[in-house]
């Protein structure tokens, strides 16, 4: 059974902490440190909110994981 892909906004409605991470990434002042910030602070938290281990069943898909990660990495310039 195919699942419908969720938009980033829909993902954030289901898991507001993802929106908070996005805002933190967007407001990062030192873009030179974006790579380290991503790997040490953002990705470890994000992988608990979306993807295989997500709390919300609708977010337990590769597509949701990719959508959320791509959006946040994009705002970080990665």
Image (cartoon, rainbow, N blue to C red):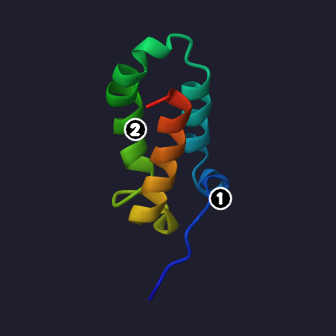
Which x, y percent locates residue 75?
Answer: 56, 32
Of 19 and 7, the residue lying toward us: 7
Which x, y percent locates residue 71?
Answer: 54, 44
Instruction: Give the residue number, with chain letter if any, for mark 1.
Output: 10
For label 2, the crowd category at 10 Å Cα-Cα, with few meaning under 14, some 14 to 19 and many 20 or more, is some
Q: Taking 37 as reference, is 10 above or below it?
A: below
Q: Secondary structure at mark 1?
A: helix
The answer to which image quadrant residue 46 occupies is top left
Determine the residue positioned at 34% across, 37% down: 44
Which x, y percent locates residue 11?
Answer: 59, 56
Determine the residue positioned at 61% across, 41% down: 19
The answer to whether 18 appears left or right of 46 in the picture is right
Instruction: Give the residue number, with chain letter if any, for mark 2.
Output: 45
Seen from this angle, which residue lies furthest front?
77
Quadrant location of the C terminus in the rendered image: top left
Of 39 and 77, the residue lying toward us: 77
Q: Taking 4 as reference, is 56 above or below it?
A: above
Report the Cα–Cα distance between label 1 and label 2: 19 Å
Q: How many labels were placed on the picture?
A: 2
Residue 14 in view, yes or no: yes
Residue 60 in view, yes or no: no
For label 1, the crowd category at 10 Å Cα-Cα, with few meaning under 14, some 14 to 19 and many 20 or more, is few
The answer to whether 57 appears left or right of 26 in the picture is left
Q: Taking 41 as reference, is 66 above or below it?
A: below
The answer to whether 7 appears left or right of 54 in the picture is right
Callout 1–callout 2 Cβ contact below 8 Å: no
Determine the residue positioned at 45% across, 45% down: 69
Determine the residue positioned at 55% across, 18% down: 28
The answer to which image quadrant residue 42 occupies is top left
Label located before the other in sequence (1 or 2)? 1
């Amino acid at each position: 059974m195919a699942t419908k892909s969720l938009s980033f906004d829909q993902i954030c409605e289901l898991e507001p902490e993802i929106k908070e991470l996005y805002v933190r990434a967007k407001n990062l002042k030192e873009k030179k440190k974006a790579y380290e910030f991503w790997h040490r602070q953002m990705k470890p938290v994000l992988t608990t909110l979306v993807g295989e281990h997500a709390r919300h069943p609708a977010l337990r898909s590769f597509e949701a994981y990719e959508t959320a990660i791509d959006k946040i990495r994009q705002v970080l310039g990665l």
